[in-house]
């Protein structure tokens, strides 16, 4: 079973995304801030991280940089999730180490396509 770490501080977003992903057969672990997300990624080695970029403790940009800098977590795909859809935000997320980028509110079909691509699955 594919394990996804969802790092999201908004309770409604966490609940909606985790339920939808679990219904599609993913195992979902949840972190509510960037510090917890970083620690859980290092401990659990998920197959993929869905990372909100506006987080307390450590923001998503810093979490992505640290995960990609550490040899034990560098290969974990990261998809940035953000309500900030300004031009340049996608490039900023990719520069921080994210492998892809999606905007909120999340369109689940679009996100599932990005998850499959990040995992190298059709």
Image (cartoon, helix red, strand yellow):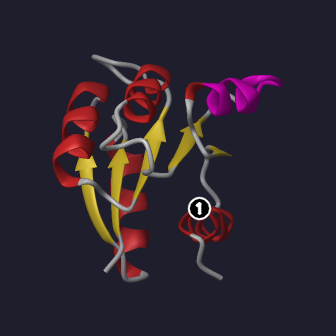
Question: Is residue 106 placed above or below 36 in the rendered structure?
Answer: below
| Image quarter (top left, top right, bottom left or bottom right) of the N terminus | bottom left
Residue 41, image x and y in percent?
A: 27, 44
Number of marks in the image? 1
Q: At 25% from the left edge and 50% from the top edge, which residue is drawn?
A: 30
Residue 12: percent from left, percent from top: 37, 48
Residue extending farthest to the right is 87
Front-lying residue, 97 or 23: 97
Note whether 84 is above or below 41 in the view shown: above
Q: Which residue is mark 1?
A: 118
Q: Quadrant of residue 45?
A: bottom left
Query: Magenta segment: does it hold 6?
Result: no
Element type where label 1 sits in the image: helix
**In the picture shown, does residue 11 fall above or below 38?**
below
At x 68%, y 23%, the residue is 92
In which image quadrant can residue 31 be found? top left
Task: Give the dominant element type of the magenta stretch: helix, strand or loop.
Answer: helix
In the image, 116: left or right of 36?
A: right
Q: Residues within 10 Å of mark 1 (few under 14, many from 20)?
A: some
Q: Residue furthest left?
A: 43
Question: Measured along the vertical axis of the image, is residue 112 above or below residue 45?
Answer: below
Taking the spot 75% from the left edge, 28% from the top edge, the residue there is: 91
The quadrant of the picture occupied by the C terminus is bottom right
Q: Magenta span has 92?
A: yes
Left or right side of 51 for 118: right
- The foreground one among 106 and 27 is 27
Q: Residue at x 59, y 71 (%)?
A: 120
Whole-percent x and y of residue 116? 59, 71
Tell me if 2 is positioned left or right of 65 in this view: left
**Extent of the magenta region:** 85-95
């Amino acid at each position: 079973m594919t394990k996804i770490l969802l790092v999201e501080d908004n309770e409604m977003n966490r609940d909606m995304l985790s339920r939808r992903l679990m219904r599609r057969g993913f195992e979902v672990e949840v972190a509510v801030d960037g510090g917890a997300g970083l620690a859980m990624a290092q401990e659990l080695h998920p197959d993929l991280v869905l990372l909100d970029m506006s987080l307390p403790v450590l923001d998503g940009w810093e979490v992505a940089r640290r995960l990609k800098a550490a040899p034990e977590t560098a290969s974990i795909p990261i998809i940035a999730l953000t309500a900030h859809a300004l031009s340049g935000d996608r490039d900023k997320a990719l520069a921080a180490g994210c492998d892809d980028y999606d905007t909120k509110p999340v369109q689940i079909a679009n996100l599932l396509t990005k998850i499959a691509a990040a995992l190298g699955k059709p």
